[in-house]
Amino acid sequence: NNYIYEESLCSNNSLSSDQDSIDQFLYLIKHWISDTLSSIVIEKSSGKCIGIIVCRFCSIEDNSLEFSRLRLYEGEKWNIIQNFKNYLSQKVDIYKYYKSVAFFRVYAWFILPPYRGQGLGKKLLECVINQQLPEMVHLGCNVISGIFTNKKSQGIASSLGLKTLYEVNYTEWANQNNVVLTKNVKTENATASVMACQINNK
């Protein structure tokens, strides 16, 4: 629930006001997590989950099918977010850019507010890059990519070697596409970046 209220695109679009979109997000996140490519942070004293990063293995073979699924989503707000992500994905062809047949995509990355500022978010992404991704090299996957929607996440990703391949001002995109955003879009949440990096094959 915290993710729905605080993730930049969800917040900018008031996703929490659209129950169909909430239901669609919860359905999808459960499906993504079932891929077993997700990592979580557990608080030792309480056993509580305080952070998560959800990734998926994407292959060039099912790329066209993935785009076709976009129009099947439920919820007006969720569809707006997916249309924006689709726009960004079409601006950068990760497969062509890295000459790869597959890549790791970051779908969601979140730390509960009280636990931020301790390096946990960075540790999660670092774990994916240094531990999970190398295990996928034999499948032709040595690239990680994601859409990072605020300056904080962009800064962390950059510090771990991901570079910006395309950046867009979300407010400008919304205006051009007749999308009504919340009135209090924060400056640090105004741009979204497609970022990626390729690890050494050796």
Image: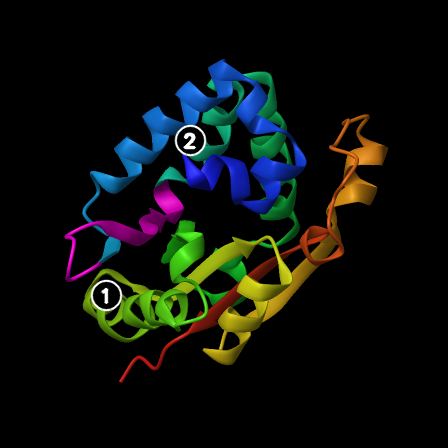
Name the spot of residue 150 as percent of width and height, x first.
62, 57
Q: Nearer the viewer, residue 20 or 202?
A: 20
Quarter of the figure that contains the C terminus:
bottom left
Q: Residue at x 32, y 52 (%)?
A: 52
Please determine whether, in this image, residue 36 is positioned above or below residue 146. Answer: above
Picture residue at 49% right of the left edge, 15% below the top:
19
Residue where numbered disc 1 is placed: 132
As drawn, is 144 to the left or to the right of 52? right
Magenta segment includes 48: yes
Q: CA distance from mark 1 to mark 2?
A: 25 Å
In the picture, measured across the screen, residue 19 lies left or right of residue 155, that is: left
Determine the residue positioned at 53% across, 43% down.
6
Going by the numbered disc 1, the residue's amino acid type is Gln
Task: Name the amino acid, label 2.
Answer: Leu
Q: Are marks 1 and 2 in contact (CB under 8 Å)?
A: no
**Residue 65 circle label:** 2
Residue 57 visible somewhere in the drawing: yes
- Please tell me whether mark 1 or mark 2 is closer to you in this view: 1
Query: First in sequence: mark 1 or mark 2?
Result: 2
Is residue 74 visible in this depiction of the protein? no
Indicate how the structure is coloured in the image.
rainbow
Of helix, strand and loop, which one carries label 1?
A: helix
Vertical order, 44 against 19 (above or below): below
Q: Kindly state the secondary structure of the residue where label 2 is placed.
A: helix
Q: Identify the magenta region.
A: 43-61
Position of residue 31 measured from the top left corner of the image (x, y, whole percent): 27, 32
Callout 1 environment at 10 Å: few (<14), some (14 to 19), or many (20+)? some
Q: Whole-percent x and y of residue 77?
A: 60, 23
User: Is 104 colored magenta in this rendering?
Assistant: no
